[in-house]
Image: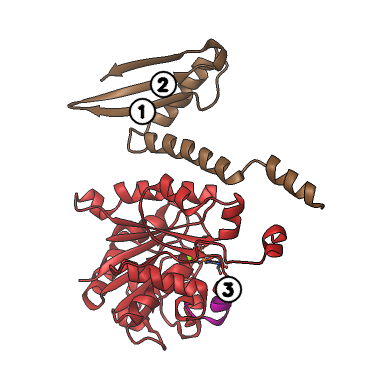
Chain colours: A brown, B red
Amino acid sequence: MGIADYFRERRSRRNSASVAKERLQIIVSHERAERGGPDYLPMLRQELLEVVRRYVTVDPDAVRVEVERDGPHEVLELNITLPEQSGSEVSTQHGG
Amino acid sequence: MARIVVITSGKGGVGKTTTAASLAAGLAKAGHRTAVIDFDVGLRNLDLVMGCERRVVFDFVNVINGDARLHQALIKDKRLENLAILPASQTRDKEALTPEGVERVLEELRQDFDYVICDSPAGIERGAHLASYHADDAVVVTNPEVSSVRDSDRVLGLLASRTRRAEEGMDPVREHLLLTRYDPQRVKKGDMLSVDDVQEILAINLLGVIPESKDVLNASNAGIPVVLEEDADAGQAYEDAIARYLGEERPHRFLEVERRGLFGRMFGG
Ligand SMILES: Nc1ncnc2c1ncn2[C@@H]1O[C@H](COP(=O)(O)OP(=O)(O)O)[C@@H](O)[C@H]1O
Ligand SMILES: [Mg+2]
C-alpha cells in the first residue's frame, strides 16, 4: 500500500470506536429504563410496537416505555418517535 | 470482619479469574489475610491460574454438603502465607451450590480472613447471583468492547437490586470498574473504546486499567498470579489497582502508546 492510499484509507474509514460508543449509549439507556420497572414492560413495549407498525413504519427502537415515580403516583410514560418525514413525535402519558 | 469482594462481569472470558487471582495475591502480599473462592462450578480454573491444582483434595461443594470441613478444603498458598484458595467443584450439577450453603461458608470465612474474594462464573444466572449476593464490594471486569460493556451494565443493575445489601436496605455494594485487555494503540487509532468512553457509559469508580499483555498468558501458563510478576506491565497495573482499592491514590499508567520511531508510528499495526 502506497503512502497516498494509506492516508486516503485513514480519512475515509469511519472511526469504529465512536460508532461503538454511540450504539452502547442507546442500548444501555433503553435497558436501564426497563430495569427496575414492572416485568411486563418489555412485552408491553413489544405489543405497542406491533400496533404502531400496523399504521406507520417505524424503527424497532421507536417505542419507549418507562415507569417514573411522581410523588405517590407511578407514571407510565410512552414515547413513540415517528419517522423523519412526518416530522413529529407523539407522546402520551397515563397516570396510574 | 472480612469484606466480601465479588469479581464479576456478565460476559465470559474477559479476565475475571485472572483478576481474582491477582487481587487475592496482591491483598495477601500487602499483609491482609485473604481467601479466594472459585464459584465456577463445573469449570474449575482458579486453581490452575494460582498454581495449586495438584493440591486440590476437597472443594466448595464438598464443604457445603458436609463431606469436608472448610479448613480441610482450603489450600494454603505456597508463596504467600496469608493466602488461601477454595477450589470449585467439577460436578456438572449446577444446583450443587445452595444459597444456605454459600452463606454458611462465607460467614465462616468472614471470621478468619480480612478479605474474601469471590470469582464469579459468567452470565447473570444462578451461579453469578450466588457469587455476588453477599458482596460488600464488586469489581466489574470489563473489556473495551460493546458486548462486554453492555453486560457490565446489566451486572450493575443486579448488584443494585438483587444482592443482600440491596434487599436488606443496607448501604449499596461498592462498585469498581476494572478495564482489562486495554490496547492504547488501537484506542489511538479509533478502533477501540477508550477508558473515558467506557467510564462515561458505566459511570462508576475506575479502579484501574490493565493493558492487553502477553505476560498474562505466560503467568497463567506457569501458575503464578500475574501481579507477582514484578516486571510485567499487567502485573504492575494490577498492583496499582490493588493499592487504589486499599485507599491509596495512584496515577493511571499504561494508558498511552509507548513512544516509537516515526517509521513505527506510520506503519505500525
Ligand atoms: N490483560 C490481559 N492481557 C492478555 N490476555 C488476558 C488478559 N486478561 C485475561 N487474559 C486472557 O483472557 C483469557 C480469559 O481470562 P479469564 O481470566 O479466564 O477470564 P474469565 O474468568 O472472565 O472467563 C485467558 O486466556 C487469559 O489469559
Ligand atoms: Mg473465570
- Please say if the residues under marks 1 and 2 sit with CB atoms less than 8 Å apart: yes
Q: Nearer the viewer, mark 1 or mark 3?
A: 3
Which range is magenta? B217-225
For disc 2, the chain is A
Q: Is residue B74 above or below residue B187?
A: below
Q: Position of residue A28 (x, y in %)?
A: 44, 40
- Please say if the residues under marks 1 and 3 sit with CB atoms less than 8 Å apart: no
Q: Which residue is mark 2?
A: A79
Residue B58 found in image quarter: bottom left
Q: Do the residues at discs 1 and 2 belong to one chain?
A: yes
In this view of the protein, which residue sits in the foreground, A15 or B6?
Answer: A15
Secondary structure, mark 2, is strand
Which quarter of the figure is the N terminus of chain B placed in?
A: bottom left
Give the residue drawn at x 54%, y 72%: B216
Q: CA distance from mark 1 to mark 2?
A: 9 Å
Q: Which residue is mark 3?
A: B217
Whether label 3 lies within 8 Å of ligand 1 gets the answer: yes
Q: CA distance from mark 2 to mark 3?
A: 49 Å
Query: Is residue B87 left or right of A82 when viewed as pictured?
Result: left
Q: CA distance from mark 1 to mark 3?
A: 45 Å
